[in-house]
Image: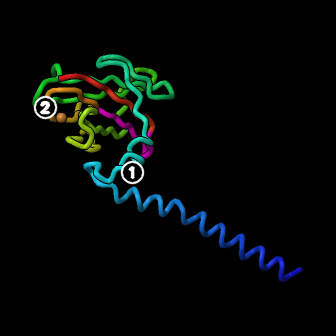
Amino acid sequence: MLGMKKWLFSILFLVTVSILWLPLFAESQHGHRSKNGSDASAASGAKQMLVYPPMPGPGKKVPIGSGHYLIYGFDKKPKLGTLIMKVEIFTREGKKDTSMDVKADAGMPSMKGAHETGDRPFKLSKKGDYLLPIDIVMPGDWEIRLTLLKEGKVIFRGSHQFDV
Ligand SMILES: [Cu+2]
């Protein structure tokens, strides 16, 4: 009976250890994905898991949970050159909330891997606006993918598509 128990325990131990290792292997694969998307399987796997639902348009209230909302906009109608994106975050009472981190990735959905900027952080201005310059390098379809973090945790993802 004792021998049987020992045997069972060692099997359980082996199974647990191998299960614990699985996420580590998955993680190391993601680490190898190349930026230009040539490593197709790993790259698409990591990117497609994140969903960025389309946001209401510029100047409109975008709910971000627990009564908070954001309003985003641009310094001009999107055209070739540098566009400044502005994001304002408000509490449910309509007061500005500057306690979050905001970042965005910009690129052309029709030219995946060609000129994504990668996630870049917005800078907080004295007025409490989050600002980020975005370079529009060619005419066509563009998408901005916005991420909001609170204390390091992602609390919102959303996208905005437009044509130049
Ligand atoms: Cu392009």
Which amino acid lies under the numbered mark 2 shown in the image of this protein?
A: Met
Task: State the separation of the CA atoms marked 1 and 2.
Answer: 28 Å
Q: Which residue is mark 1?
A: 41
Q: Position of residue 23 (x, y in %)?
A: 52, 59
68 is higher (above) or lower (below) than 50:
above
The magenta stretch spans residue 153: yes
Which amino acid lies under the numbered mark 1 shown in the image of this protein?
A: Ser
* Mark 2 Cα shell of 10 Å, populated few (<14), some (14-19), many (≥20): few
Q: Secondary structure at mark 2?
A: loop
Q: Position of residue 148 (x, y in %)?
A: 38, 37
Figure quadrant, ligand 1: top left
Q: Which residue is mark 2?
A: 138
Q: Position of residue 100 (x, y in %)?
A: 37, 38
Is residue 128 visible in this depiction of the protein? no
Left or right relative to 139: residue 48: right
- Residue at image position (27%, 51%) is 35
Q: Main secondary structure of the magenta part?
A: strand
Is the C terminus in the top left, top right, bottom left or bottom right quadrant? top left
Q: Residue reaching furthest left?
A: 81
Is residue 102 visible in this depiction of the protein? yes
Boundaries of the magenta span: 144-154
The image quadrant of residue 32 is: bottom left
